[in-house]
Image (cartoon, helix red, strand yellow):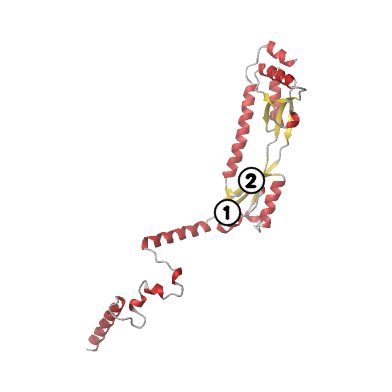
Amino acid sequence: MMLKALLLLLLLANALLLAANLGVLPPLAGLGAAQREPERVQRQQQPELLQLLPAEAASAALREAAASAAESRASVCLEAGPFAGADAETAERALREAGIAGTAWQAIRAEGNGDYLIYMGRYTDRELLLKKLEQVQRLRLEVEELREPAELRPGLSLGRYASQAAADAALARMAQRGLRSAKVVELAKPQSQTLLRLPAADGVLRARLAGLALPKGSHFAPCGVEGAAAAASAAARADQADQADRAASAPAAPATQASSASR
């Protein structure tokens, strides 16, 4: 009998609790309708800060938060540059002053290109320049009127090269074609190039790098992006040099034409 009475009592208590939660009965001891939404929100101290989301929107928000946290923890490779001369020193100093540990970044150094010009001039007047231009064109060599630097005008350019050796070799081939009065001029010496790389930058480090002031407006980007731009620039210069080399190695002009240009 006692067991049956206890069972009936439990069933009655569950029924009352269910009725209170459904709002059938007045709130009991803080239970029931007063605890349901949206009444529960209204009992908060700052209900305006709470927003009820549909289940689908809440799941999407949770997934986005999880993805953001995972991205913040993930480490990526970042690099900036290449920088030359004083710019390299300035960029390295910016990293140190930002408190970024020396073990977190690398300074990768490589020898850069120079700028060498095969040049004819300076000429006393434009009439003489045009006469020389015509003579070189008869040798079937690529030539153009020099626009810069100003201190070498008026003059002619027969190609620009990234190294002294490449320019000397091209000039020797042109000489075999009958060119006599050209020379190699050094416009810029080769400079060491420095690439700054952080092999494993997490979210905290990336945030610090984002506000870092680097020379000439440079910034850190995923490894290979700026390196690819530098490579593209170098490839363009190499292509120009290759075109000049092909022009210099073209079939020689008749001897009568060559002799007229060598005088």
Q: Residue furthest top?
A: 256
Q: Secondary structure at mark 1?
A: strand
Residue 1 is situated, as x and y percent measured from the top left of the image, at 22, 89
Q: Which residue is mark 1?
A: 200
Residue 67, x across and y down, in percent: 47, 57
Residue nearest the observer in this picture, 167 or 53: 53
Mark 1 vs 2, N-terminal side: 2
Is 158 situated left or right of 26 in this image? right
For residue 203, above or below residue 174 = below
Q: How many marks?
A: 2
Marks 1 and 2 in Cβ contact (< 8 Å): no
Q: Which of 177/118 is in front?
A: 118
Residue identifier under label 2 = 81
| Vertical order, 125 against 111 (above or below) | above
- Among all residues in the image, which is located at the extreme bottom? 2
x, y percent for residue 204: 57, 59
Looking at this view, is 148 or 102 the one in front? 148
Amino acid carrying label 2: it is Gly
- The answer to whether residue 195 is seen in the rendering is no
Single out the mark in the foreground, 1 or 2.
2
| Residue at 43 percent of width and 68 percent of height | 50
Label 2 Cα crowd, 10 Å radius (few <14 / some 14-19 / many 20+): many
Quadrant hosting residue 210: bottom right
Q: Position of residue 5 (x, y in %)?
A: 24, 87
Q: Amino acid at mark 1?
A: Ala
Task: Compare residues 57 and 225 and report the one nearer the observer.
Answer: 57
Quadrant that contains the C terminus: top right
Q: CA distance from mark 1 to mark 2?
A: 17 Å
Asked whether residue 192 is in view, the answer is: yes
